[in-house]
Image (cartoon, coloured by chain):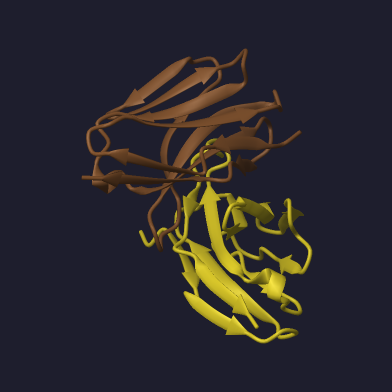
Amino acid sequence: NAGVTQTPKFQVLKTGQSMTLQCAQDMNHEYMSWYRQDPGMGLRLIHYSVGAGITDQGEVPNGYNVSRSTTEDFPLRLLSAAPSQTSVYFCASSYRIRPYEQYFGPGTRLTVT
Amino acid sequence: QQQVKQSPQSLIVQKGGISIINCAYENTAFDYFPWYQQFPGKGPALLIAIRPDVSEKKEGRFTISFNKSAKQFSLHIMDSQPGDSATYFCAASIHNTDKLIFGTGTRLQVFP
């Protein structure tokens, strides 16, 4: 089991560029989510999905898009990068019957200049 | 109010001492209270979790104490070790949803 994988590990973007952060899990988890981690702010939920074809907004969704075409994959798209999106991004997944037990990926450190 | 307030922001403890991290919440619709541990450069990992109908849960050196009437819960790390140095997040899951709300984190440093 690879668990939750994320690519890339590091990325530098210029303001206005777009990109997709990849996330995949091989545990057959129904629930997948994206968080951003900023100093002093904890982990804030961006978007989440409870199954293929179903997504919803979290606490800080603006500037980000998601889709879930398969159980395994949950990519996060930055439409037009802004310096305020400089952060560490984590993907997580869990079984719906145990939502408190989320498995996190290793993270993507994104810098927008 | 879907917030979990965590304190302190940072904590320095000597090896062998007790580390205590506190969290408080307002929303009574929370139904599980997990703690996550994060080492530098890694994603958070579940450490221990408690339900609100239980006042205490212990796993090895880690104990969660839960006070339902005060809407507070805390993590105690007994006999703290340098290997426990990490950032700890409390969290709460919202009943009938899949969402977790995280506290702002506590950076624990244990010195030998």
Which residue sits at x=41%, y=63%?
A: B41
Q: Quadrant of the N terminus of chain A?
A: bottom left
Decide which of A33, B37 is in the foreground and name it: B37
Q: Quadrant of residue A70?
A: bottom right
On the image, the x and y values in percent for residue B65 come to 45, 21
Instruction: Please state if A39 lies on the left or on the right of A49 as rendered.
Output: left
Q: Is residue B19 above or below residue A63?
A: above
Give the camera-side residue of A75 and B51: B51
Along the horizontal axis of the image, is B63 left or right of B103?
left
Q: Residue B112's x, y, as percent?
A: 20, 45
Q: Is residue B50 visible?
A: no
In which quadrant of the rendered image does the C terminus of chain A lie? bottom right
Chain A, hue in figure: yellow
B77 to A30, vertically: above or below: above
| Chain appearing in brown on the rendered image | B
Q: Residue at x 59, y 67 (%)?
A: A87
Based on the displayed image, in which of its 4 quarters is residue A3 positioned?
bottom left
Which residue shows up at 52% across the image and 71% down it?
A109
Q: Is residue A82 left or right of residue A71?
A: right
* Residue A6 location (% of width, % of height): 49, 69
Residue B11's place in the image compared with A81, above or below, is: above
Q: Is residue B4 visible?
A: yes
Q: How many marks?
A: 0
Which residue, as the protein is rendered here, is positioned at the far right? Answer: A62
Q: Foreground: A23 or A19?
A: A19
Compared to A44, does B70 lie above or below?
above
Place of residue B84 in the rendered image (x, y in percent of width and height, measured from the top left): 30, 44
* Of B74 and A81, the residue lying toward us: B74
Instruction: Determine whether, in the image, residue B104 is placed left or right of residue B82.
Output: right
